[in-house]
Amino acid sequence: MDPKEIKERMKIPRQPMSEQDPKERVKNFYEVPQGYTPELAMQEAKRCIQCKNPLCVGGCPVNIDIPWFVRLIAEGKFVDAAKKLKETNALPAVCGRVCPQEDQCEKVCLVGKKGQPVSIGRLERFAADYAREHGEVTIPDIPKWTGKKVAIVGAGPAGLTVAGDLVKKGHKVTIFEALHVAGGVLMYGIPEFRLPKKIVEAEIEYVKKMGVEILCNAVIGKLKTIDELLSNGYDAVFVGTGAGLPTFMNIPGENLIGVYSANEYLTRVNLMRAYQFPEYDTPVLRGKRVVVIGGGNTAMDAARTALRLCPEEVTIIYRRSREEMPARIEEVHHGEEEGLKFQLLTNPTRFIGDDEARLRKIECIKMELGEPDESGRRRPVAVKGSEFQIDVDVAIVAIGNGANPLIPQTTPDIKINKWGNITVNQDTGRTSKKGVFSGGDIVRGGATVILAMGDGRKAADSIHEYLATGVW
């Protein structure tokens, strides 16, 4: 690209994406961002200057050829762009919606050095949606069966990615999913207004059409063990069981009626569709005054969900300041637009109930920031004598998740760390047990969808090599 064209492209402003009005969307569970039109997508794609050394590719955990698919969009070749995405990403419509691009590919975009980066995530979403909506999703040619079979435990982002990659290499793949539907955190954790379930279902259907078998209601560790899978026809196993074990604060009153873990609250609303009660028969306490404890994406998902269930007030309680909140800036912005309140530099010390063991108040203490801790953020320190109480009906604890313990408990020769996460070789996903690989949140703890998928891609390559050579 000649310097003159680069200069012209740098003048194009970042194209906005239309969204539901905050006053309307807080009353429904429909998706908030409404996507690009073809014209807007082409204009945004033309902002890409096609760098000779595209740092964005290295910033993507699954190494999508970003300049190529963006160029195809700029040329109006939307279906070809979707095909290019699918070469390295089995779930582009998902990633285009929920990945923190601002901390990955867009963070290193050269266009962003002098202005706003190219909207890579929005373009990814556009291409994937366009192909699906126009019936142009094509299944790649699958090679002849190699004679090898792989079992995958967990149909979340990591497991689905491993499955998609391995089946394209000629292996037979079966996913064992504990829940009654596939998708993992994509189905039970992320709200409908941020990731419509029909999008997840379409991406899963694509993986199935490639030849991946998915068995639901199959709890490995109960139905069968890892050892039984390996001795009954499977040549390798990938464990992607996630971080579904709730973390609580261990303060008085956590067993009161009205205190939820974010896992339970979001699972009830998202997977079991409690927001459509009584049409769906899973209830959830709605309350009038709701607090959500935590500052990450899960806390934001829980808080913005609570706003839609008609309470009078929803407040985020977070022990650090706004600058330290790990939640995506876009999600915090959307929450504020919808009326979400923030009680910062505050930490709960106990939950207070009535005579019927129902939550009525939370006692909190003010915090101040001290020296940085191991995360690099300033450590919160309690201010003596600053206790105060808040009236509340529902509290949702969203301070993190622990690793699912079932596989380590039933496979004692798989090494785990002090937090219960499976220990792996970071480059290959290999565990301490021959033939067994792992990745995603069961290894990392609670992390992002795209990092789990990146783990899946590495593991798939490593599994393929192991199946071909037999070398461990």
Image: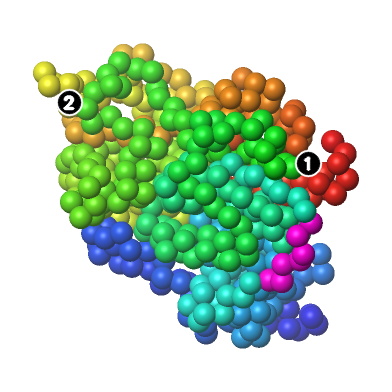
Task: Return the x and y of residue 468 as percentages of the image width and height.
Answer: 85, 49
* Nearer to the camera, 321 or 406: 406
* Nearer to the camera, 191 or 210: 210
Q: Is residue 115 among the parts visible in the rendering?
A: no
Callout 1 secondary element: loop
Residue 395 within the magenta-colored segment of the rendering: no
Figure quadrant of the C terminus: top right
| 246 relative to 472 in the view: left or right | left
Residue 143 within the magenta-colored segment of the rendering: yes
Q: Is residue 459 among the parts visible in the rendering?
A: yes
In the rendered structure, find residue 358 and report the number of the disc placed on it: 2
From the viewer's perspective, is residue 457 above or below residue 287?
below
| 175 relative to 426 in the view: left or right | left
Callout 2 secondary element: loop
* Picture residue at 63% right of the left edge, 25% below the top: 411
For residue 110, which quarter of the picture?
bottom right
The amino acid type of the residue labelled 2 equals: Arg
What is the crowding at mark 1: few (fewer than 14 residues within 10 Å), some, or many (at least 20)? few
Q: Residue furthest top?
A: 384
Q: Earlier in the sequence, mark 2 or mark 1?
A: 2
Task: Return the x and y of residue 50 as percentages of the image width and height.
Answer: 75, 73
Magenta region, main secondary structure:
loop
Q: How is the image coloured?
A: rainbow
* Picture residue at 74% right of the left edge, 42% below the top: 235
What is the crowding at mark 2: few (fewer than 14 residues within 10 Å), some, or many (at least 20)? some
Task: Return the x and y of residue 157 as percentages of the image width and height.
Answer: 57, 50
Residues shaded magenta: 140-146
The amino acid type of the residue labelled 1 equals: Asp
* Picture residue at 40% right of the left edge, 25% below the top: 248
- Which residue lies under the disc numbered 1? 427
* Picture residue at 55% right of the left edge, 31% below the top: 221
Task: Return the x and y of residue 441 as percentages of the image width and height.
Answer: 58, 38
